[in-house]
Image: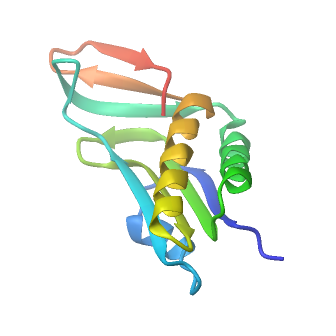
């Protein structure tokens, strides 16, 4: 049997929405829920100039565990999730997740659960750099 987890990786190279979408394509799927997290230029009223993501060595395994957990809770055809580490510029993709299912509601619900659980449990930290030179670490994906 083919696993529904088609892609679960931490990468230090640019991410592709098309790659993640293609990973969850299934002829039986009637819907794909897809989320792309992008580096924005502000946070809490402060001007962000760049981000740097770091991951614990267990992050890839934890990402796969999260994907498996979502697969067990929802009736899905396929799941894909990729998170980037390293230095990112404003507008860069930081995370892309997708879920395909027979129907849109299940695909969208599972996709939302996937990104929410990823953000809460996968050990990835971001350092935000602000205009003026200061920075702060944030324990979230």
Query: Nearest the camera: 111 or 121?
Result: 111
Colour setup of the view: rainbow
The residue at the point 56 percent across, 29 percent down is: 120
The residue at the point 66 percent across, 38 percent down is: 59
Q: Up-down: is 103 above or below 28?
A: above
Judge left or right: residue 134 versus residue 110: left
Residue 57 at x, y percent in the picture: 70, 35
Q: Up-down: is 57 above or below 45?
A: below
- On-image quarter of the N terminus: bottom right
Q: Residue furthest right?
A: 1
Judge left or right: residue 2 versus residue 26: right
The reply to whether residue 123 is visible in this rendering is: no
The residue at the point 53 percent across, 60 percent down is: 106
Total of numbered circles in the picture?
A: 0
Q: Up-down: is 52 above or below 129?
A: below
Q: Up-down: is 89 above or below 2?
A: above
Residue 82 at x, y percent in the picture: 53, 53
The reply to whether residue 51 is visible in this rendering is: yes
Query: Nearest the camera: 130 or 41?
Result: 41
Residue 48 at x, y percent in the picture: 21, 27
């Amino acid at each position: 049997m083919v696993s529904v987890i088609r892609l679960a990786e931490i990468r230090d190279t640019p991410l592709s929405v098309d790659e993640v979408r293609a990973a969850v394509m299934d002829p039986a799927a009637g819907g794909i829920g897809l989320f792309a997290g992008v580096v924005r230029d502000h946070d809490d009223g402060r001007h962000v100039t760049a981000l740097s993501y770091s991951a614990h060595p267990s992050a890839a395994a934890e990402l796969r565990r999260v994907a498996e957990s979502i697969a067990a809770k929802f009736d899905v055809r396929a799941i894909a999730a990729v998170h980037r580490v390293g230095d990112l510029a404003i507008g860069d993709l930081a995370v892309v997740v997708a879920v395909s299912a027979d129907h849109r509601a299940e695909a969208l619900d599972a996709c939302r659960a996937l990104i929410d659980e990823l953000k809460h449990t996968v050990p990835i930290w971001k350092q935000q750099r602000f205009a003026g030179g200061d920075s702060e670490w944030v324990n979230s994906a």
